Amino acid sequence: MPQQLRQLLKLVQQGQLSIEEAEHQLSTHLSKHLDFAHVDVHRQLRQGFPEVIYCEGKTIPQIKAIAQEIYRHNGKLLATRATETIFQELRPLFAELYWNPQARCVYSPPPSPQLEQAIAIITAGTGDIPVAEEAAVTLTLFGFPPQKIYDVGVAGIHRLNAYWEVIQQAAILIVVAGMEGALPSVVGGLTDKPVIAVPTSVGYGSHLGGITALLAMLNSCANSITVVNIDNGFGAGYAAALMLRQMLQFQIKNGNRHE
């Protein structure tokens, strides 16, 4: 349960806050209506991470207005598929803001790491790195900075051997590949880790903008593979972060039961 919601419930339990006031606080923090958007400012309470801005298709004034509302309610910001122009427009509005040009992400300062090296991101080629970096930024904002293993695809699969210790240490693997999308199957067949496979739109004409890789991953006979959408590094990073967070919370709860 997100910390803010837990604190609110504790105040009600301790008699420091009435049920009516708690209800009012929850209802007034559900969303913020703008002329062009309903900003989900309640998402941090529900899911432990605020709404993320997908910048493509939005105007700069729209992005700026949404970003300010999200940050005002949550103190965090992540905007994906952003350009450097968007970063320069947002930068004066916040005390500190970062720009990762490969990931195409604009984001607020990440928290201190909760757990490092628990997730490894592996790419087949250098061309897959932008999608991998989007996943990496997302994980870092959750407090789970990943290990990165780039350009170790099946055209030279021996390159993977140099990183075997890193792979074995990780709890979750994100494998990003374009072309024929074979790398997740290889990794899934060699390890006991859950693999989140990310197809990319890297490849020649018969690649069909990533559909070939997507179908290959969906049809993998490696049992450990789950597949996200084409070029969806954010979705892969978000899912991996939630898995890891739930694992940690379960361990804490289970440990408390045995004390």
Image (cartoon, rainbow, N blue to C red):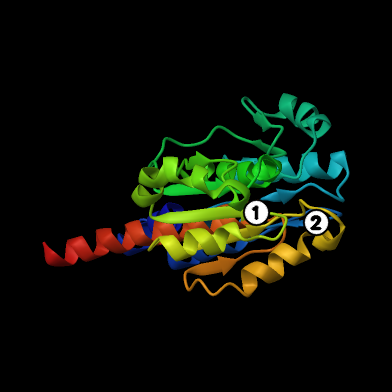
Picture quadrant where residue 182 is located: bottom right
Q: Return the x and y of residue 129 as percentages of the image width and height.
A: 65, 41
Check if mark 2's residue and mark 1's residue have beta carbons within 8 Å.
Answer: no
Work out whether residue 179 or residue 66 is closer to the camera in this orientation and state it: 179
Residue found 30% across the figure and 59% down from its top: 14
**Disc number placed over residue 177 in the picture, else none:** 1
Could you tell me how many numbered marks the image carries?
A: 2
Mark closer to the observer (2, 1): 1
**What amino acid type should be assigned to the residue bearing mark 2?**
Ala
Picture quadrant where residue 205 is located: bottom right
Alpha-carbon neighbours of circle 1 within 10 Å: few (<14), some, or many (≥20)?
A: many
Q: State whether residue 185 appears in this view.
A: yes
Work out whether residue 62 or residue 180 is closer to the camera in this orientation and state it: 180
**What amino acid type should be assigned to the residue bearing mark 1?**
Ala
Is 207 drawn above or below residue 202 in the view shown?
below
**Disc number placed over residue 37 in the picture, else none:** 2
Work out whether residue 242 or residue 9 is closer to the camera in this orientation and state it: 242
Q: Return the x and y of residue 157 as percentages of the image width and height.
A: 54, 49
Alpha-carbon neighbours of circle 2 within 10 Å: few (<14), some, or many (≥20)?
A: few
User: Which comes sooner in the sequence, label 2 or label 1?
Assistant: 2
Quadrant of the image containing the C terminus: bottom left
Is 45 drawn above or below residue 88 in the view shown?
below
| Horizontal side, residue 232 vs residue 221: left or right | right
Q: Return the x and y of residue 195 as percentages of the image width and height.
A: 50, 61
Q: State whether residue 29 appears in this view.
A: no
**Disc number placed over residue 26 in the picture, else none:** none
Secondary element at tag 2: loop
